[in-house]
Image (tube, rainbow, N blue to C red):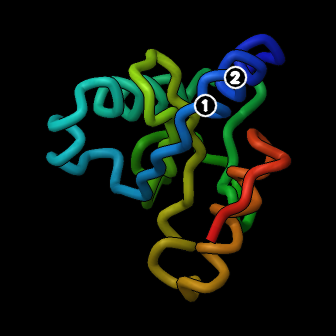
Amino acid sequence: MSRHDRRRFRHQVSGAGLLTYLVSPTDPRLGDVPLLGRAARWWTYCLPNALPPRSCMLCKRSLRCEQDVGLVLLSMPAAPTTCVAYVGLCLDCYRDADWVRIEAACIAALQEVLPAGKFS
C-alpha cells in the first residue's frame, strides 16, 4: 500500500469506522461483498510476482502462492468505498499457532495502517 493509499484509507476510516474480516481467501461468503472478494482474489493472484514479496503477518515467512495462504485479514472503511487493506497469514500459522498470537498479529497489522486506532 503506497503512502497516498494509506492516507486515503485513514481519511475514509476516520469518519466511518473500520470493518475487518479474517477469512480464507476462497471463502464463498466473500461473494456477499464483491469488493472484498475481488480484493482477496487480486491479492492472492499477485503473490508470485509481488514486490516486495508478501509475508505472513505472524511468522514473516514468504507467501509465494495461494497454497501458502491460510487466511487473509481484509479491512475496509464502514462507509462506501473502493479501499481495502489486506495482509495474509500462512497456512502453517493458521494450522498451528494459537488464536491469541493470531489476534495479536492482526491487531499489529491494523495498527500499521491506523496507528491511533483502538482494536480489541
CB-based contact (under 8 Å), mark 2 and mark 1: yes
SS for callout 2: helix
Is 4 located above or below residue 6 in the figure? above
Q: Is residue 35 left or right of residue 116?
A: left
Q: Return the residue at label 1.
A: 15
Q: Return the residue at label 2.
A: 11
Return the x and y of residue 85 as percentages of the image width and height: 58, 34
Q: Is residue 69 left or right of residue 53?
A: left
Q: Is residue 65 left or right of residue 36?
A: right
Image point (16%, 37%), residue name: 32
Q: Quadrant of residue 89?
A: bottom right
Comparing 2 with 42, the one in front is 2
Q: Can you say which quadrant of the picture contains the C terminus?
A: bottom right
Q: Can you say which quadrant of the picture contains the N terminus?
A: top right
Image point (51%, 33%), residue name: 77
Residue lying farthest to the top in this orientation: 4
Comparing 13 with 67, the one in front is 13
Q: Residues within 10 Å of mark 2 (few under 14, many from 20)?
A: few
Q: Is residue 57 left or right of residue 73?
A: right
Amino acid at the residue labelled 1: Gly
Image point (67%, 39%), residue name: 54
Return the x and y of residue 17 as percentages of the image width and height: 55, 42
Return the x and y of residue 36 as percentages of the image width and height: 35, 32
Alpha carbon distance from label 2 to label 1: 7 Å
SS for callout 1: helix
